[in-house]
Amino acid sequence: MERNAGEAANDGLTRRWPVAVSGTVVLLLIVAAYFGFLSRSPRPPAIAISGLDPAVAKLIEVTLWEARANPRSGPVWGKLGSVLMHYEFVKETRLVFDRAEKLSPQEARWPYLHGLLLMTCDAESAIPKLQRAVELTGNRPDMPRLRLAQFLAERGRDAEAEPHFHRLLQVMPEHPLALLGLARLSHHQGRLAESTNFLHRCLSDPHTAKNAHALLATVQRALGNASAAEEAAGKSALLPADRPWPDPYWDEAAIFRMGRKALIEEATSQMDQGRLEEALPLLAKVTREYSADDEAWYLMGWALNQQQQSSDAEQALREHLRRSPQSPKGHAQLAVALLAQQRHAEAIEVLEAGVKLKPTWRELHSNLGYACVQLGRYDRAIQHFRDALHHDPNYVPSYTALADLLMRRGENDEALRLLRQAMEISPSDPRARSLLQRVEQSRQ
């Protein structure tokens, strides 16, 4: 029986329909599988970025997007942790690093950085993270083992720390921080001669010199060697802060420290190490991009004073005081800039304003005494040096400055008493010794 055209058409549609249905089902299954995959994939934590430095907020937002787009990438999650760890999102950073470690179990960076994060908030959890990093790296790079050894020693776990320091010396026999670490352990355990031997091997290294001399002074004092102790302490006081030991994992993460706070911290670190030429460009960047920040202007003025660029320092410090007029340290540093330019009367006005803000600050009184001496105002200078001594009786230059003025007036008895006190505090101070000899000769 013949079928009409309509029936034939319906039959064709019927034959094609299962194919169409099958294609749709497959597509739906793919979409469902995709969204099912996403639902099972870890999602990065929610981060409240409102109120953050705009540069920081943008960085976090971009890195979160990368983690959402690559939910099973260990390096991407590690990068997110490396970003968040700098901005006080401790709980969130821990979750992120945990995920990075699971996704990249053979990568030492993530347990190491995780351990650094935990050192300040959960010390007992930090140790196994650092130990895992050491298992993965051995001694290359050496910083995971060094951090672990130092952290164990700081927590009084000497027996666990000591083998790690010795392992570092096996690879690098004159490893300065391993030597310093062993010197500290020896001192702590009362092995003073052994501690001294370790210290002598790291006194000249810029990564350990300051702390090694400070510890040597303590050890020599315990051995009863007063003069050697004083000499070591004096050298330590004059040395810049020890340079940080190279840490490639931290350096990689540190590139994500940005914004005002990070710039100021980096500049301050450079200044502590005496590297002012590296600090100044950072401070210039802060004052340019965050011009309302009073602290950056102060630090710039301080650094410029240290470099004897007093005119530029004055400009920076006046800007600091314009934004923070009640700053005693701003007044103190501005006075230093003015004194360097021999503008003594102006410096006195600034210092007197500073004293009203912080009357117990010895530096203000000392500089007032100096400025008054330059203008021939000796009575006022004597009073200011007395005030300086009252507020800081251990500052030897105040004794010598006051004794010198008293000797000019013939008040040798009081000058002698002050100089003897100064010598008790610092027996090797050359100015105190010279003045003491003069005043003793005048009494003969």
Image (cartoon, grey):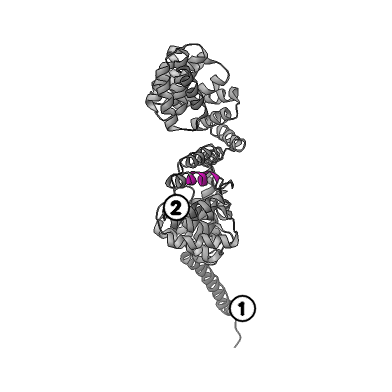
Q: Check disc 2 and report its element: helix, strand or loop.
A: helix
Residue 335: x and y in percent read: 51, 21
- Asked if the stretch drawn in magenta spans residue 87, the answer is no
Distance (Cα) linking label 2 and label 1: 105 Å
Amino acid at the residue labelled 2: His
Amino acid at the residue labelled 1: Ala
Q: Which of 288 and 143 is in front in this view?
A: 143
State the extent of the magenta-drawn residues as a range. 209-216
Q: Answer with the quarter of the image where residue 414 lies.
A: top left
Q: Check disc 1 and report its element: helix, strand or loop.
A: helix
Q: In this view, does 265 lie to the left or right of 421?
A: right
Residue drawn at point x = 58 percent, y = 23 percent: 310
Q: Which of 257 and 80 is in front in this view?
A: 257
Residue 17 can be seen in this image? yes
Residue 45 can be seen in this image? no
Residue 10: x and y in percent read: 57, 77
What is the total number of numbered labels drawn onto the structure image? 2
**Rendered view: 156 above or below 231:** below
Q: In the displayed orientation, state which residue is furthest to the front.
A: 444
> Mark 1 packing: few (<14 Cα in 10 Å), some, or many (20+)?
few
- Asked if the stretch drawn in magenta spans residue 213, the answer is yes
Q: For marks 2 and 1, give the one nearer the viewer.
A: 2
Instruction: Give the dominant element type of the magenta stretch: helix, strand or loop.
Output: helix
Q: Which of 301 and 187 is in front in this view?
A: 187
According to the picture, the residue beneath numbered tag 1 turns out to be: 5
Question: Dots 2 and 1: beta carbons under 8 Å?
Answer: no
Q: Which of 437 and 343 is in front in this view?
A: 437
According to the picture, the residue beneath numbered tag 2 turns out to be: 187
